[in-house]
Amino acid sequence: NVLIVALEDALGRHALNKNYGYSRSSSAKLSRSYFTEPNGDFKMVCNLAGFDHEYIRMKAKQYFNRKKKEKRTDIPNNW
């Protein structure tokens, strides 16, 4: 499924993600924008897969924001 591969890329976990010329974080950030920024391709892919693109975008944003907050709390206080 295209959405699964895109999500794996956004999380930096896709096995085939070679990051050609990009750092892992830059590639993942670019992939996350596919979910978080409005675009016609995302809408079409969601519709073809039988999903509501607005719902998927909302859930993806919630997940990415939660992970960002968790990452911030992992930093030791003495930093």
Image (cartoon, grey):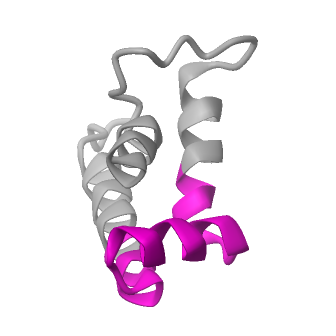
Task: Tell me the residue at 25%/55% (across/down).
Answer: 70
Is 45 colored magenta in this rendering?
A: yes
Is 47 colored magenta in this rendering?
A: yes
Q: Nearer the viewer, residue 31 or 72?
A: 31
What number of labels is visible? 0
32 to 75, vertically: above or below: below
Q: In this rendering, would 1 be left or right of 40? A: left
Task: Tell me the residue at 33%/28% (across/down).
Answer: 13
Task: Tell me the residue at 37%/77% (across/down).
Answer: 56
Q: Give the image location of residue 5, x and y in percent.
A: 39, 40
Q: In this rendering, would 22 be left or right of 64? A: right
State the image quarter where residue 50 is shown: bottom left
Q: Give the image location of residue 72, x and y in percent.
A: 35, 51
- Main SS type for the magenta part? helix
24 to 7, vertically: above or below: above
Q: In this rendering, would 34 be left or right of 71? A: right
As drawn, the residue found furthest toward the front would be 48
Q: Give the image location of residue 69, x and y in percent.
A: 32, 61
38 to 2, vertically: above or below: below
Q: In this rendering, would 2 be left or right of 70? A: right
Magenta residues span 32-60
Q: Give the image location of residue 37, x and y in percent.
A: 66, 71
As drawn, the residue found furthest toward the right would be 21
Q: Quadrant of the C terminus?
A: top left
